[in-house]
Image (cartoon, rainbow, N blue to C red):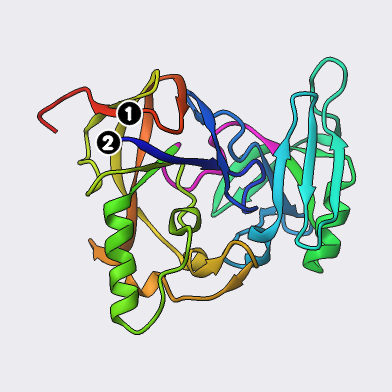
Amino acid sequence: MQVLRLGYAAVKGTRHLTRERVSLTPDGVAGDRAFCLVDPATGRVLKTVENPSLTSIEARTDDDGTLRLRFPDGTEIRGRLDAEDGEPITADAESSLDYWGRAVTARLLDGPHAAAVTAYLGLPVRLAATDPGDVVWAGAVSLVTTGELARLGERLRASGGTAPEALDERFRATITLDTDADPLPGTLLRIGSATVEVGRRIDRCAVVDVDPSTGRRSEPVLAHLERHDGLLTFGVDARVVEPGRIEVGDLATPANPQH
């Protein structure tokens, strides 16, 4: 098995960007979903399924603490999010937010980003910094495979539809592996200098129907996923057993061959 693609989104719900390399920490990918957008009236973290146009915003962080948001029209908003000591500049004290019914602690941030996203979405939002893993739906790491992606494409075409390009981006997978089938639960995979343990299948929602280049729904991908235990699933999650660095092209080798 070989790593074909790596990706993550610095701001939860924004476009899942391809990366050449990632660093795995005990909590997942460094920088992945480090920020989220919040409805200030309710304290709820914005859900991508309710705000699909978020997926067309590209978010990147620089080493100097700058967060850059690029919108589909080419507009780019830049702003520092940390002070000289590296701590976030907060507008308020720590706040408790609602993430799918789970309380998470976040720090609301000052800066130009929230105003720009507010104008783009047409609804008020705040930008918040969260602790690693707090606004992650499934496991800290997610895996998809080229074999399963190919079979999904075949099902879409057989139904008279088309197979969208970059399907793995729609599934927002941390790692795309060039292999025929998903590794089994309990499999330990040595990838680059990191080791992960494969967990459960990931249940999916209508976000996978959204074209990330436009933020609009297109092919009905969700309806063509296989059902397991009553849920539409695709890919598997994983936990980090040994932190390390992974690059595109690295081999993924089972550390427990019985799997």
Residue sitting farthest toward the bottom? 160
Q: What secondary structure prevails in the magenta region?
A: loop
Q: Quadrant of the N terminus?
A: top left
Q: Is residue 10 above or below residue 249?
A: below
Q: CA distance from mark 2 to mark 1?
A: 6 Å
Secondary structure, mark 1, is loop
Dot 2 or dot 1: first in sequence order is 2
Is 205 left or right of 36, judged from the image as shown? left
Location of mark 2 (residue)? 1
Residue sitting farthest toward the front? 249
Q: Type of residue at label 2?
A: Met
What label sits on residue 251 in the rendered view? 1
Q: Is residue 62 above or below residue 5?
A: above
CB under 8 Å between discs 2 and 1: yes
The span picked out in magenta is: 129-140
**Front residue of 21 and 233:** 21
Q: Type of residue at label 1?
A: Leu
Q: Is 130 covered by the magenta stretch?
A: yes
Classify mark 2: residues with Cα within 10 Å, few (<14), some (14-19) or many (20+): some
Is 36 left or right of 120, judged from the image as shown? left
Q: Quadrant of the C terminus?
A: top left
Residue 199, horizontal then vertical, whole percent: 29, 39
Residue 150, horizontal then vertical, whole percent: 30, 60
Image quadrant where residue 78 sits: top right
Q: Is residue 82 above or below residue 159?
A: above
Residue 177, horizontal then vertical, whole percent: 34, 41
Q: Is residue 231 visible?
A: no
Image quadrant where residue 132 sits: top right
Is 56 left or right of 175, judged from the image as shown? right
Taking the spot 40% from the left edge, 18% from the top edge, the residue there is 193
Taking the spot 54% from the left edge, 34% from the top edge, the residue there is 20
